[in-house]
Image (spheres, grey):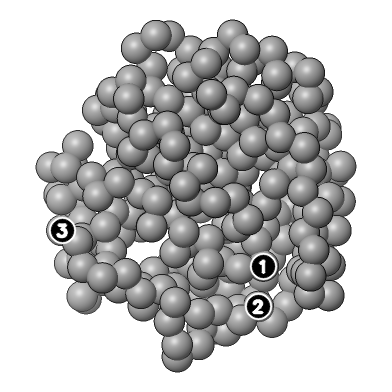
Amino acid sequence: MGMLFSVLYSIHSAARNVTCSKVHELESFQNASIFENYLNEIIRTSARNVQQRPFTTSRGKEDMELQFGQFWKDAVNDLKSTDVILEPGAGDFQLALGFQSPQSPQYIGISFELIRRTPEDVTEMAKRNPQQEFIVGHFFEKIPKKRLLSRGPIKLIVDFFGVLSYTARPSQVLRKYLEILDDSGYIMIQGPLLSYQGKDGLVEILKRTEGIEFIVSPSDSLINTSPNIFIRKNGRPLRVPRVKILDVDQGIPPQRKIEILNSFI
């Protein structure tokens, strides 16, 4: 897997140079700014609007394979039963169904709001599969890192129209992803609609982020044709540029115009 990343990263660089098996109740986001409250309402509205669009909340293992291709297959094949897959923005936890054998890696899914499954459904899923944990109704930013790391090393974070597609704090989310990611792990991202001066906002953030290597790879999938982004840490100190969100529309997910600041977290 490391060899595949190294080859892709070399190509990309050249191109650039030219216990817890339970469901948790809704957490109020106290002291949120007016903007964050507005964005949270957009999230709720989006969740209601996607009820007729099953893919939006039902991204299973096969969908991930179609979207992320060989990179996904190799990364998953490298995982041991003690490793952890983290899916922030997991919808109705469809991906978890692909990792239910005794040899499967641990799985932690985070969903702001369920659409087709009930809390009782998810509780039953957790009882049947103790290697899986489902967190419902919590903002990813508010979940303690210690809690997310309690099951073992996080070797794969997959954000497929997940938290980065909706958060008002993309820099903080990216920084947290990197902090909890194992040194040999990978982050796979698809879907965030961030715009910076007419360019892909997330790519521009990553260009300015220190301590990482990343690949922007064209998608071969018919599911979504936006580029896939693959990230790994390079062992150097992490620094992520701060971002200010200037405007948000009401799309699914919302398009956000950003300003990248000259300071870091």
Report the disc number at residue 189. Answer: none
| Contact flag, marks 2 and 1 (Cβ < 8 Å) | yes
User: Dot 2 lies on which element?
Assistant: strand
Query: Hey, what amino acid is under mark 1?
Result: Ala
Q: Does any portion of residue 240 appear in the rendered image? A: yes
Of residues 224 and 117, the one drawn nearer to the viewer in this rendering: 117
Badge 2 crowding class, 10 Å Cα cut-off, few under 14, some 14 to 19, many 20 or more, is: some
Of residues 83 and 224, the one drawn nearer to the viewer in this rendering: 83
Q: Does any portion of residue 56 appear in the rendered image? A: no
Earlier sequence position, callout 3 versus callout 2: 3
Q: Quadrant of residue 247?
A: bottom right
Q: Which residue is mark 2?
A: 245
Q: Viewed as shown, does residue 182 lie left or right of 145?
A: left
Position of residue 157 measured from the top left corner of the image (x, y, whole percent): 43, 43
Q: Which residue is mark 3?
A: 10
Query: Hey, what amino acid is under mark 3?
Result: Ser
* Spatial separation of the CA atoms under disc 1 and disc 3: 32 Å
Query: Hey, what amino acid is under mark 2?
Result: Ile
Position of residue 57 measured from the top left corner of the image (x, y, whole percent): 69, 34
Question: What residue lies at 57% left-to-right and 34% top-to-bottom?
Answer: 109
Question: What residue lies at 69% left-to-right and 82% top-to-bottom?
Answer: 246
Earlier sequence position, callout 1 versus callout 3: 3
| Contact flag, marks 3 and 2 (Cβ < 8 Å) | no
Position of residue 176 measured from the top left corner of the image (x, y, whole percent): 46, 59
Q: Disc 1 vs disc 3: which is toward the camera?
A: 1
Q: Viewed as shown, does residue 4 lie left or right of 238?
A: left
Question: What residue lies at 53% left-to-right and 67% top-to-bottom?
Answer: 172
Badge 1 crowding class, 10 Å Cα cut-off, few under 14, some 14 to 19, many 20 or more, is: many
Position of residue 112 measured from the top left corner of the image (x, y, whole percent): 72, 44
Earlier sequence position, callout 2 versus callout 1: 1
Q: Which residue is mark 1?
A: 168
